[in-house]
Image: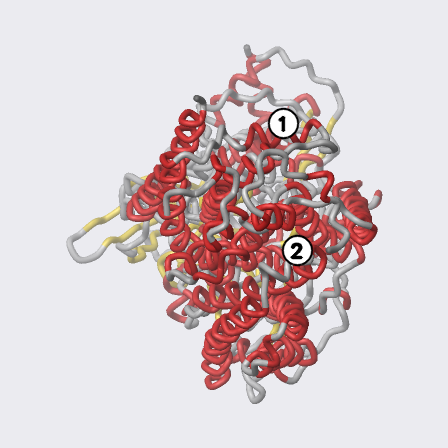
Amino acid sequence: MSNLSITEEQEGAAIHDERTHELVADLLPKKFGTAGNLWVASLFLVVLIGGYAYYHQLRDGLIVTDMRDFTSWGIYISNFVFFVAISLVGSLVSAILKLSNVEWRTPLVRIAEIIAVSAIMLAALIIIVDMGRPDRIWHLFVYGRIQSPIIWDVIVITTYFTISVLLLYLPLLPDLALCRDSVKTNIPRWRKKLYRVLALNWKGTRSQYKIMKRAMQILAVLIIPLALMIHTVTSWLFATTYRAGWDSSNFGPYFVSGAFMVGAASVIAVMYVLRNHYHLDKYITHRHFNNMGKLLVLLSLIYLYFNINEYLVSGYKMKKVEGEQLLDLFTGSYAPIFWMVQILGMVVPIIVLLFKQGRKPLPAFIIAVMVVVGAWFKRFLIVTPTLLHPFVPIQHVPESWMHYIPTWEEWSITAASLAGALLVITFFVRVFPIVTIWEIAEERGIKLEPHLNPEVK
Amino acid sequence: MDEFSEGVLRTKTQKIIRTVEDQSDNSRRKFLKATLVTGAMVTGGLGTLEVLSEETKKETGEKIRLLSPDGKIVEVDSSVINPAIPDIPLSAHNVRDGVPGKKFVMVIDLSKCKNAGKCRKACSKMHYLPEDRSYIKIDKMQDAETTAPYWMPTPCFHCDNPPCVKVCPVDATFKLSDGIVAIDNNRCIGCRFCMVACPYSARVFNWGEEQFKITEERFEEIKTHESCSSHVKGTVEKCDFCPSKAIKNELPDCVNACPNGVFYFGDENEDVVTNGDETVRLSQLLIDKAGYRYLEELGTKPRVYYLPPANRQFPFKEVNEVKP
Amino acid sequence: MKNCLLNYFQFLLPAIFLLTSENLFAQEASDSAQATIQLSFNDRDTVRQVTAKIVRMSADGKETPVKDVEIHFYIARMYSLLPVGGDVQTTDESGSVTIDFPKDLPGDSEGNLTVIAKVEDDDALGNLESEKILKWGVPVANKALTKRALWASGANAPIPLVIAVTSMLLLVWGVIIYIVAQLFRIKKLGRV
């Protein structure tokens, strides 16, 4: 087989057939090998360096960044938008694909949902990092003004996070019971307790399944408008201002379509890594890469459509300041990044993924990573060039104020946030089954332990 | 009035000047006090003088020379000057209301501006700002390649439909009834949404301690009670139309400092603006000289009008970097 | 008491010059002859006029009009004095000047205006001033900011916004609370 430490998580009770044993052994959480430990250690290191940088920032103020009066928002904000964008994937897989009765989504649901949850958590953290007075965050709740798009964002993000956690948790219940009931010889006591407490007395009865499935259905319906809202409201942080490049009625759908695209790509990337590391080939198959690849093409085409709308329409008019900003993107100082993002981050992926060869696991993974990286820089291009083209010309200021080049503190905090998101996902994978065992069993007609059989469809 | 002796003459006229004596760190209290005074309308200047005169004030024998408004040097006994007028308790007054009955407005005459930079200097001095930051920016504007360049000073416009106030999540910036858009530096969380929302780039941010360090020399010139804004790290600031001067019936420092009479300031309700020398009816001035507002089409309804740079007093000259 | 009064006139009066941006005393005597400005107001249907007459009081109480003196007319404003009446005129033989007064000047909330007539730096008379408060202004009321608007305080948000956000919140969080309740139900069902 492989380097499974089966002894740790052996099925204790009666094993009904070999397939059950195999399924459970494949999918229950496994210990980290060397690679895993190295992975976690390096992520921790990145987080620690970021923590030190944040200490600098708390001590000296935001002056440790390269943000100044004209470029008053920087990569913290573009990183925030990036995380919110990725978080929409939870709704894509758990809800949209579910309600469309897309069967092949089953092994990917939990991956998508944990990506969503960790992305939202880090979005909230990075926005606190961006605040000039994080000690006053409670002002948002005591003195909040309902007219402010930031307050709308706080409300929507909180709500979306809650629903995402519920969408992650509810279908986790039968698997938690499985973990709880396995004979655990080497599992630390805290984990045994964790499973027991979180499993909520799950016995797999008909009524429990009924409640759980119905709750999933309700949440799936609820989260779709919420997902649309979360990124539309985030786009309104920009679109409610007058700035050239932001003053666009296109921003809502532009951001939402981009979010679905980068979310789908992140699922492809994560599922490739997990599949390879945990040998989940039987569950995450070529078919999944094929279909996710096709989905990514579709989402990318929609995003391309909104990109064209955004740039062509303003480019046609070339209004004074907006035109200067566009030229900066097309041919000016931001041209290299802009064309790299558009071509390598959007056009090339579309082309490659149109071919069946391109939708094999490895090419799909590479393309997915390109899309994710491109998406990060795309958000940077949304934030910074606009701020460098205000209506009032930037004059009589220090030369460094004329551009924005993030400092090491900003980079390390940003990297730490990305590492933090990966750490959350890693921790989850370590403790909980990343593929929904009971749903796979249901699909394949495998019987789990009697009391865990999903009798009710 | 500036040539007075060290014991700054505290006087009671139609308004009370409040001595902000509490120099504690609590900038909220400072802000509160400063704007409470702004809102106070005091009665009976004469009455209180009578009160003063009835006290048995011993003549110290020390004479102080003062300048009267009609240009006469007058000698008064120093006992007359009362440096520590006790605070008259003000009625419970909401600091977020502004000076009752006023609606401040400014007119900037672009035909007279030659980038002397005195407004910026005075404003920086008034607000304890360091050299490279100012609430007023003086930009070289050139509307088209074929049109003439001109200098344009831009303070905060205190818009009547303020985009910055709309987006503030914690009510840290707000519109007063006298037209001023004010900032509460103790409420601000430093999200800088107002900064990106302002299309006129009027706001500045306290990025770190360096940003508002005052050098020793500058500190000496500053009268301690002239502070208009509190520099709090991690919060936003901007031009505030100098409410601490308004309560003394004095024009903002930029208006007084300009040697060319570029800034006119006044009360829209009175329909009068003055630049220290000329006093004119606002409505007439805007009609006669075709006043307009910058980026009117955005719908922000600024309270600062511009008079176009026609019939210039000075030819446009590219001046070397004017030190604030 | 006498000492007090003496102080008052000798020391505080000059101080008063400093204190007040506009002199509060009407008919302030200059240091030379006792000339005064007398103000009279004429409000006919079509036009309003202010007449200022300069007279010199002689020792025996006889009034002598003074002519060829420039009189400036002002309205007291917050920061300064607004000139009214067009170009500066000089007194005629009867010692008076009449100007037309605009009808559309804003006053305070009751329409009060302070009209000031001044003689400035005259060779013979020095500085003279006279003022009067009367209701010749247009009353101006300053409304408090209680209107609901996007830029108002949180409590004065536009009603549609408040309704929209509140109802969405209640709906969504109502569902969430229901789901959480279902979780508890699952737990209860399993406790056999």
Q: Which residue is drawn at 81% across and 54% down?
A: A35
Res. A182 visible in picture: yes
Residue closest to the far left: C45
Which three-letter amino acid code belongs to the residue tagged 1?
A: Lys
- Which quadrant does the C terminus of chain C fall into? top left
SS under mark 2:
helix
Closer to us: C150 or C171: C171
Seen in the picture, residue B91 relative to A224 is either above or below; the reply is: above
Q: Is residue A213 left or right of residue C141?
A: right
Closer to us: B79 or B75: B79
On the image, the x and y values in percent for residue B31 come to: 58, 34
Image quadrant in which you'd find residue A86: bottom right
Seen in the picture, residue B216 relative to B306 is either above or below; the reply is: above
Res. A127 visible in picture: no
Which three-letter amino acid code belongs to the residue tagged 2?
A: Tyr
Which-is-in-front pick, marks 1 and 2? 1
Closer to us: A245 or C89: A245
Q: Is residue B61 left or right of residue A455?
A: right
**Tag 2 or tag 1, which sits nearer the N-term?**
2
Seen in the picture, residue A345 relative to C118 is either above or below; the reply is: below
- Which quadrant does the N terminus of chain C fall into? top right
Q: Residue at x 31, y 47 (%)?
A: C164
Q: Residue A76 carries which label?
A: 2
Marks 1, 2 in one chain: yes
Q: In this view, does B201 lie to the left or right of C110?
A: right
- Which chain is mark 2 on? A
- Which chain is mark 1 on? A
Q: Which mark is residue B283?
A: none
Closer to us: A48 or B218: A48
Q: Name the residue under label 1.
A: A193
Q: Residues within 10 Å of mark 2 (few under 14, many from 20)?
A: many
